Image: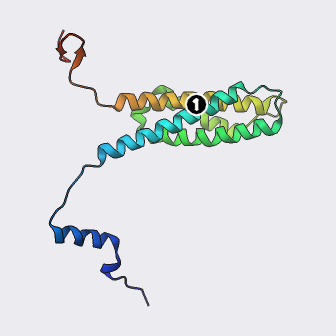
Amino acid sequence: MDAVQSPSHSNVDDEVRHDRLTGHTIEVPLGPLLSQAATTVEEHAETEAERIAAAALALPHTHGAMAIASMTDRLLTRVGGLAAGIEHIPVCRRGVRGVAALAKWQTLQDRGPAPDPLGKWSHMRELAHLSHDMVRVLQEHRAAEQPRGAFVGRPGMPPLTPGAP
């Protein structure tokens, strides 16, 4: 027998009923707020990826295998997240750098570290450089997508319209 939930137990129904009873409904466009929140989260993830990549590039090849493996694991996680972000950019807007970064990511995943003594360290460094490249792709895309103001302000002078000479 299927359980039937009473409308009085549903939070959504209670909220709708409450709005109907008071007659006061306020509509707030969430698009800009969600976009701003998403941008903040993306910027934090990019900053963290940059920090980890810088730490990886500063790690000498003489460091222990566990430290290199740990750093590689952290980079794989970050680069995977950055790659997912680039994949959400429409192909026509990715640009050459975005396409190249995804191709390099695929190559590094398929190939893995080389079997020579510096293979794991070199693989970690390639991931760190790729992380930097992916962050640049995402930052450039976000900058290109942000709306531009209609006027250019000039200190002490009237604003300049975009079509003015």
Between 106 and 7, the one lying in front of the other is 7
As displayed, is residue 26 above or below residue 53?
A: below
What residue sits 16% from the left and 62% below the top?
Answer: 24
Q: Quadrant of the N terminus?
A: bottom left
Residue 51 picture quarter: top right
Q: Quadrant of the C terminus?
A: top left
As displayed, is residue 20 above or below residue 148?
A: below
Badge 1 is on which residue?
A: 50
Between 96 and 128, the one lying in front of the other is 128
As displayed, is residue 35 above or below residue 8?
A: above
In this view, the residue farthest toward the left is 23
Q: Is residue 6 left or right of residue 88?
A: left
Q: Position of residue 17 (x, y in %)?
A: 23, 72
What residue sits 65% from the left and 40% below the top?
Answer: 76
Residue 19 picture quarter: bottom left
Q: Position of residue 85 (x, y in %)?
A: 48, 40
Between 26 and 137, the one lying in front of the other is 26
Amino acid type, mark 1: Glu
Disc 1 residue crowd, few under 14, some 14–19, many 20+, Cα 10 Å: many
Q: Position of residue 43 (x, y in %)?
A: 47, 35
What residue sits 83% from the left and 34% below the top?
Answer: 64
What residue sits 78% from the left and 25% below the top?
Answer: 60
